[in-house]
């Protein structure tokens, strides 16, 4: 009898110790209930509770959880049927609320997310649905997070994984995309031809400008050359006039001194010039020499005599060599 009592006592002590000492693993929190009523929450670590009075109520995972949203059909605003699935990230912030405010937290978050996916995506056109996925994610996150706040849960992210339109709609979109690309290609080709025509016209314009500039420079150079030639001709005529004036002065001095050879010089000069003009004329095939050719010769001899007399004083003024 004593051994049975001792055994029962040992079992009671072991059960009491087991009911008193509790350990909570990292990433979890446990609720404590006293006579079925929630009293407090146990954080990760070692804890002691009242045996036979307190007990562990709900074990809650407070780490961030990932939940797959199954595929569902959604009708868009423009009556296009698409198949959509997604993924939800959520985390429990208040253990007591997540344990006692809702019977199944995971099922509640899932159903709330699927309902709002249909609501948000059903208010958008198909093109907007396919091109504004970030907007859909943001709107879903805002709505679902606000709805799960009374449950002590924070929805951190909602992502739409896949949007699958019907096959015939995909084919239509492919043809539309091809037509749009062909249109852009034609526009770019026309734009390229337009730019090429503009560049060609601009090149032709620049060529004409350069050509006109070259003609202008050529005309300027030609005018400068004519100007320089005219200046040289004027200078030559001026020198010729000066020479003739000097000759006239010498002849006048000779006439003043009583020499008739000077007059013969002028007559002979004009006579020779007239003969030269007759000889160079293209209409004359036969040249008749006048009978007075002998007088021309004597006139030339007179010119030689005049020259001798003009240079004789210079020779007389040179010093004579000593013998």
Image (cartoon, rainbow, N blue to C red):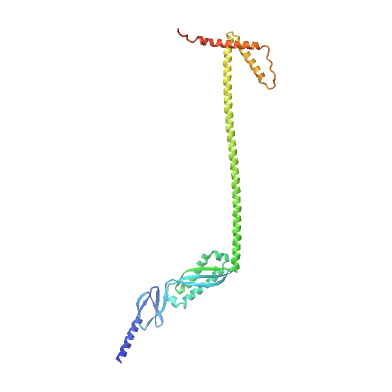
| Residue 200 picture location, percent across and down | 60, 46
Residue 289 sits above or below residue 172 on the image: above
Of residues 154 and 177, the one nearer the viewer is: 177
> 278 left or right of 217?
right
**Across the whole image, how many numbered discs are drawn on residues?**
0
Of residues 282 and 303, the one nearer the viewer is: 282
Q: Is residue 86 visible?
A: yes
Looking at the image, which residue sits at the far bottom? 1
Quarter of the rendering occupied by the C terminus: top left
Quarter of the rendering occupied by the N terminus: bottom left
Residue 115 sits above or below residue 183 on the image: below
Residue 297 sits above or below residue 225 on the image: above
| Residue 109 picture location, percent across and down | 48, 74
Residue found at x 46% / y 74% = 151
Residue found at x 32% / y 88% = 7
> 92 left or right of 310?
left
Residue found at x 59% / y 41% = 207
Of residues 261 and 89, the one nearer the viewer is: 261
| Residue 110 picture location, percent across and down | 50, 74
Looking at the image, which residue sits at the far left? 2
Of residues 322 and 67, the one nearer the viewer is: 322
Give the image quarter of residue 308.
Answer: top right
| Residue 46 picture location, percent across and down | 35, 76
């Amino acid at each position: 009898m004593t051994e049975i009592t001792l055994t029962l006592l040992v079992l009671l002590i072991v059960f009491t110790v087991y009911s008193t000492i509790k350990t909570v693993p990292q990433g979890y929190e446990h609720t404590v209930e006293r006579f079925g009523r929630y009293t407090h929450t146990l954080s990760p670590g070692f804890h002691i509770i009242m045996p036979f009075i307190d007990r562990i109520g709900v074990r809650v995972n407070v780490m961030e959880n990932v939940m797959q949203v199954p595929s569902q059909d959604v009708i868009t605003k423009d009556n296009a049927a698409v198949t959509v699935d997604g993924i939800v990230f959520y985390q429990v912030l208040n253990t007591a609320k997540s344990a006692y405010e809702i019977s199944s937290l995971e099922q509640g978050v899932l159903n709330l997310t699927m309902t709002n996916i249909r609501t948000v995506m059903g208010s958008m056109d198909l093109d907007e649905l396919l091109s504004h996925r970030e907007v859909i994610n943001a709107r879903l996150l805002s709505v679902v997070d606000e709805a799960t706040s009374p449950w002590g849960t924070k929805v951190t992210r909602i992502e739409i994984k896949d949007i699958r339109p019907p096959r015939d709609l995909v084919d239509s979109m492919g043809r539309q995309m091809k037509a749009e690309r062909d249109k852009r290609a034609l526009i770019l080709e026309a734009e390229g031809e337009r730019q090429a025509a503009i560049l060609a016209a601009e090149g032709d314009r620049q060529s004409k400008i350069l050509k006109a500039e070259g003609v202008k420079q050529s005309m300027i150079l030609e005018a400068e050359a004519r100007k320089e030639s005219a200046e040289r001709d004027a200078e030559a005529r001026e020198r010729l006039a000066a020479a003739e004036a000097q000759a006239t002065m010498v002849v006048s001095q000779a006439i003043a001194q009583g020499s008739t050879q000077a007059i013969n010089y002028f007559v002979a000069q004009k006579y020779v010039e007239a003969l030269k003009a007759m000889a160079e004329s293209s209409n004359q095939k036969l040249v008749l020499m006048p009978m007075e050719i002998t007088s021309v010769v004597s006139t030339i001899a007179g010119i030689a005599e005049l020259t001798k007399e003009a240079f004789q004083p210079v020779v007389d003024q040179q010093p004579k060599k000593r013998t």
